[in-house]
């Protein structure tokens, strides 16, 4: 496996919609595995192919909830409900975080690793992470959806104030 270089904002690839995957090939599976390796190396919970300069509708998510990695191939949200404000951050915009409105429940249609169309249902933090990655595939950054943006230092300061 390989570790990709993560593209940083303001690279225009981050705001360019990705192209659908025509078929699940060994190369597509290799890209997914490399995305996962890169995500882990960068201490992330999700990574989309455009973030490594590959304009294909591919992403991986692993929120470390014991359910393992989820590979997303041509994902489309077909249902979403129960919006809630929550935290967002991005490996392509290090040190910047925000509060965004996202669905707590989603149903997603996509291809699995064998190329079969499947639908999955996800909730809470895993659903939030999937929506963030699908946004990347559509050329949308969390900063355009943020209700409030803050730097890492502000986040630490607020956390320390809550403790003390």
Image: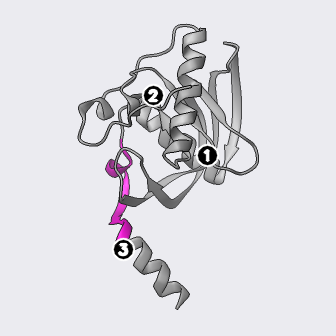
Looking at the picture, tell me which residue is in the foreground, 164 or 42: 42
Which numbered disc flags the more N-terminal residue, 1 or 3?
A: 1
Residue at disc 2, secondary structure: helix
| Extreme residue in the right direction | 66
- In the picture, measured across the screen, residue 49 lies left or right of residue 105, that is left
Of tags 1 and 3, the one toward the viewer is 3
Secondary structure beneath label 1: helix
Measured Cα–Cα span from mark 1 to mark 2: 18 Å
Which of the image's four quarters has the N terminus? top right
- Measured from the top left, where is residue 29 in percent x and y? 60, 18
Q: Residue at x 34, y 66 (%)?
A: 150
In the rendered image, which residue does mark 1 sit on?
127
Residue wearing tag 2: 49
Q: What x and y, as percent, mark residue 134? A: 49, 35
Relative image position of residue 32 (x, y in whole percent): 57, 25
Which span of residues is magenta-colored? 141-153
């Amino acid at each position: 496996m390989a570790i990709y270089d993560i593209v940083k904002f303001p690279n225009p690839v981050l705001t360019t919609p990705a192209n659908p995957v025509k078929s699940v090939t060994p190369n597509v599976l290799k890209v997914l595995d490399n995305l996962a390796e890169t995500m882990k190396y960068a201490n992330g919970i999700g990574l989309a192919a455009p973030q490594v300069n590959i304009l294909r509708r591919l992403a991986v998510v692993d929120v470390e909830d014991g359910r393992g990695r989820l590979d997303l191939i041509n994902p489309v949200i077909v249902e979403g409900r129960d919006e809630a404000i929550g935290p967002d951050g991005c490996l392509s915009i290090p040190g910047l975080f925000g509060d965004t409105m996202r669905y707590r429940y989603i149903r997603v249609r996509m291809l699995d690793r064998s190329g079969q169309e499947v639908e999955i249902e996800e909730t809470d933090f895993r659903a939030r992470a999937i929506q963030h990655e699908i946004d990347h595939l559509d050329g949308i950054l969390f900063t355009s959806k943020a209700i409030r943006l803050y730097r890492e230092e502000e986040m630490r300061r607020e956390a320390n104030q809550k403790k003390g």
